[in-house]
Image: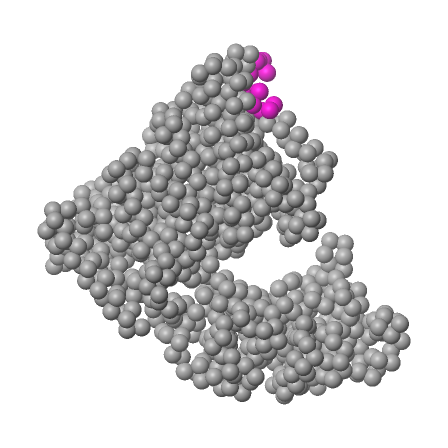
Amino acid sequence: MNRVLEIAGLVKTFGGLTATDNVSLTVNSGEIHALIGPNGAGKSTLINQICGELQPNAGQIHLAGRDVTHLSAADRVGLGLGRTFQITSLLDEMTVRENLGLAIQAREGSNFHIFDRAATRSEVWNETDEILSGSALGARSKVMVGDLAHGEKKQLELLMALSQRPRVLLLDEPMAGLGHIESQQMIASLRAARSECAMLLVEHDMEAVFALADRISVLVYGRIIAAGTADEIRADPAVREAYLGEEDA
Amino acid sequence: MILLFEQLLNGLQYGVTLFLLAAGLTLIFGIMGVINLAHGALYMVGAFAASWVAIQTGSFWGGLLTGLVASGIAGIVVELGVMRRLYARDHLDQVLATFALILIFNQTTVLIFGRQPLFTSTPEVLSGSIEILPGLPYPTYRLFVIAVGLAVAIGLYFLINKTRVGMLVRAGASNRQMVRALGVNIQGLYTAVFGLGALLAGLAGVMASPIVSVQVGMGDEIILATFVVVVIGGVGSVKGAFVAAIALGMFDTMLRAFLPATLQQVMPGPEAQALGVGISSMGIYLMMALVLLVRPRGLFAGRG
Amino acid sequence: MKRENLLLLVVFILLALVPFAAELTGQSSWIKLVGQALIYGMAAASLNFILGYGGMVSFGHAAFFGIGGYVVGMLYHHFDAGTLFLGFIPGTDQMLITLPAAIVAAGLAAALVGALSLRTGGVQFIMITLAFAQMFFFLFISLKTYGGEDGIMVRRTNSLPGLNMKDKATLYWVVLGFAAAYYLFLRRLVQSSFGQIIAGIRQNERRMAAMGISTYRYKLYAFILSGMGAGLAGALMVNFLRFASPDMMHWSRSGELMVMVILGGVGTLAGPFIGAGALFTLETMLARVTEHWMLPVGILLLLVVLTSKGGLMALARKIMGGTK
């Protein structure tokens, strides 16, 4: 098995509070690894450390065999780390097409050119139009992102993240705020994308987790209390007590 | 040695003046999130009102009262008329609107008082000097300014830490959303805080009026130093404003007092003088740049 | 697109005709007024690139304007006195040398200020840029060699081969040429790959970082480009007025440049030029009528900020019923 993302002994404290308590986990290539846990378990803190927005107090993060613990967020993206945001984060004053185009332009480089015309870079716009026409957003390409529905924004974020051709994609609650039909669409999109990259899926929606995940880790109070396949997690007494138990009771 | 001590006291006096200005500014910054370049204009209003009344009536104390009332009213009018519309705007609009206020305040003052500076004398009770160390007489009035400044600092400490209004102010300075969520009369709180800030700025102006020349534009010079204090201290922190104001007041005074003479020992006279004054003027800005490089949000930053 | 170019051409021709109109009507001060407005327009447009397109509220832009101006003044001073700058650089009065030198010097200063300031954001960024500008202001005040507070008189405008720069109209046309070229440069810049990245950073810096963009480097590059533009404008101004003084970098000058940008329209190409023209004309007109011209200017500015979004450009679009 080829480990795309490897986290070892990660610790993050805020004042007296330990938000990430010696967390280790791996994401193998071609795998969807789900990270679940109750609110306040430290999932977002963990994601932000993997992305490079927060520096851990201890531990290492390896991306495709390379130590990226002290690299900037942007440099990690360059090495193949993609992400989506829990609260969608897009360029609201640009259209759908311009958002995706800018993502592809960012990947293609030559971004310090000041005498070219961004609007005529065929390598950018051919790919943009191709991706859009193959997606549910094809008909919405000229719409301002600020005017999109929530579900459409989530879809666009996923398209932009995938357009970076990441080795591993961090999905921070991709189902959050989606209705039933939109959730089904998102699950289908993620399933279709699994051939392109590995994923670390942080999610509350257990239906989606059980539908998608190859392995599941359970984070409670900053600590991983269990890890395994969906069936193993369902059967784990510690998980039932600490987490699933809440819902059963 | 005695000269050094005297300059330290001068620095302290400048420092408390800066604090009177910075305390209001940092609260306004922290609670309403608004940049008020025109805060120095309120200082000018206080100084002019006080000087004019003092000259007309011969009473410093009457001037003091008038200055406080005038600056407080000016502050409340500005809050109701202009600031209120700026809270939700971005910093750029705030900078420009308050820049416009400076123009308006300065020109209105010229229209009323002309361009000639006003001069007032210190009240008789405080006009002498006190020998605080053997061989060092120090003007009583300046000691009075220091005492008033420190008293205000202590008063603000109690107001902010021991009263309900203070609790709201503290909560507002560190987390604006929280105060909104508490459901208090936010507009009233804003007006009160702005009025208090204006009052303190006016007090600084009144206190300075017998020491500096009271003229149009006097607020523009000191407001920049005040901003440096607020930013170094950490936006929203009155404690930070106090520490930074005293430190910068001393630092600035020391540089101006001793740097030109020091330079004259290694350079020809007039050039050393000019360079010394220039570098002294740069001192506080240099300090701010250095502090922000180490702590990008200032020394006592509230909001994370 | 075509209509826009046509409009630009018409405006350019009208501006080029100003010296003739001035001669016909005997209003020779028009040349000076329009020329200065064009130069301020360039400075404001350079600020607008980081402020309007890049979202960086710099309150110290006049520093780069002043530095560009001082380069021209200082080179002329050494040329005139036959001395060497720093002991090894001879002075010159050749515009083909002084302008590039001014651009480079302003760019270096912007690199220094930007590299340090861009580590902060928000209010702190506004204040630290102001602080650096104040440092430059006091630095030049303290340089007795270059006139201290009084500044440097440049007795003769820099020469350009083949042109009689003593002629007011010729000098005006040179300024107009630079302003037009700078406008076209900015138009290209905002449409370039780099310009798009900068626009993205203004809207959502975190998103751009998630695309692998090292936002700090891009912002710094933009800051330097912008400073260079201001340096060019300052150098032209000193040539135009034959005078360089610390006043050029006073903090109220930085405020004025921001006013021009807002008045004309943030994040538009023509806005800063329109804003500069409007403010400068208004100031000049009012100054003839009353010595208290700052009062109406202040009231007008306050009204513009409080009541309108988008400045004069938005107003013009509304009236013309144009798209976009």
Residue in the image at 47% along x and 77% along y = A142
Magenta run includes residue B165: no
Residue placed at 53% from the left, 40% from the top? Answer: B79
Q: Compare residues A22 and C187 and report the one nearer the observer.
A: C187
Tell me if residue A238 can be seen: no
Q: Nearer the viewer, residue C194 or C315?
A: C315
Q: Is residue A41 above or below residue B187?
A: below
Give the number of callouts.
0
For the C terminus of chain A, the quadrant is: bottom right
Evaluate whether residue A111 shows in this view: yes
Relative image position of residue C36 (x, y in whole percent): 25, 49
Looking at the picture, tell me which residue is in the foreground, A78 or B154: B154
Q: Where in the figure is residue A150, as x and y percent of width and height? A: 61, 72
The percent position of residue A140, horizontal first and vertical second, equals 51, 79
- Residue B136 lies within the magenta run: yes
Horizontal side of C314 relative to A6 (left or right) equals left
Q: Name which quarter of the figure residue A159 lies in.
A: bottom right
A182 w.r.t. B170: above or below: below
B76 relative to B267 in the view: left or right: right
Vertical order, B186 against A31 (above or below): above
Q: Residue furthest left?
A: C24
Q: Give the image location of residue B94, x and y in percent.
A: 48, 48
Quarter-of-image position of residue C199? bottom left
Where is the N terminus of chain A found, in terms of image quarters?
Answer: bottom right
Quadrant of the rendered image containing residue C225 = bottom left
C137 horizontally vs B195: left or right? left
Magenta stretch, residue numbers: B130-148
Seen at 62% across and 64% down, the residue is: A53
